[in-house]
Image (cartoon, helix red, strand yellow):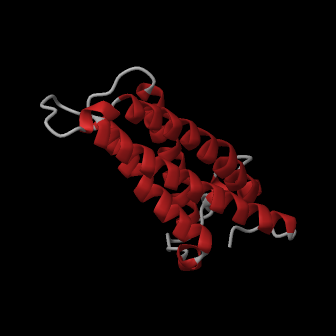
Amino acid sequence: PPTVPPPPGPPARGSLNLHRAYLRSPLGLLRLGQLALGAAFWVTVAAHKYEGAAHFALFAAVLVWLLTLALFGLSLLGRWELVPWLGSRWLLTNLVHDLALGVGLYAAATGIMGHKAKQRSFCNLPGYSQHCLYSAYLSASICGGITACLYLFSGLYCLSRRCQDQQDII
């Protein structure tokens, strides 16, 4: 009896290569800054005693940071087509992420931490002997404000590419 060849397997995926053009693009550089300053924000908050609305600020910062890390990783590897429905709209996905989530949540988190720093401004006086969270809250507020600005810049970059009828992030 004749032997039947085995059915073909799934198509092999290409090897993982870094998308170096993305890493050198304005969006790639902004993403690196967002990841660094975003981590500085939430590590500063998480490393100190926090209460009340700071829980939301920490949640928002970590959520946006993790989503940014996922966007950065998929873009760096050139694998955004693996994301169902969003992969075909990658520029729009980045635009919405940056302007709605990045700017919106980091602006809220910055406002919360700035308000908490203002509430603790009395304890930065010389001779105050109790543990003071003023500098931690102020540092987080500054990192959050700069991070929100970076998200605004990357959102405007994606918006300008979208207005020029370009579909790619680079």
* Residue found at x 49% / y 53%: 69
Tell whether 117 sits left or right of 110.
left
Residue 66, position as x, y percentages in the image: 48, 45
**Above-or-below relation of 66 to 166:** above
Residue 70, position as x, y percentages in the image: 52, 52
Residue 113, position as x, y percentages in the image: 44, 36
Query: Can you name the residue that lies furthest to the top here?
Result: 52
Query: Can you name the residue that lies furthest to the front here?
Result: 126
Residue 118, position as x, y percentages in the image: 41, 34
* Residue found at x 57% / y 59%: 150
Counting every numbered tag in the picture gives 0
Front residue (pair 3, 27): 27
Pick the quarter of the image with the N terminus. Answer: bottom right
Front residue (pair 37, 29): 37
* Residue found at x 45% / y 40%: 62
**Above-or-below relation of 11 to 131:** below
Q: Give the quarter of the image for residue 155.
A: bottom right
Pick the quarter of the image with the C terminus. Answer: bottom right
Q: Give the quarter of the image for residue 11.
A: bottom right
Whether residue 85 is visible: yes
Tell whether 161 sits left or right of 27.
right
**Above-or-below relation of 37 to 77:** above
Tell whether 36 sits left or right of 130.
right
Whether residue 4 is visible: no
* Residue found at x 55% / y 65%: 30
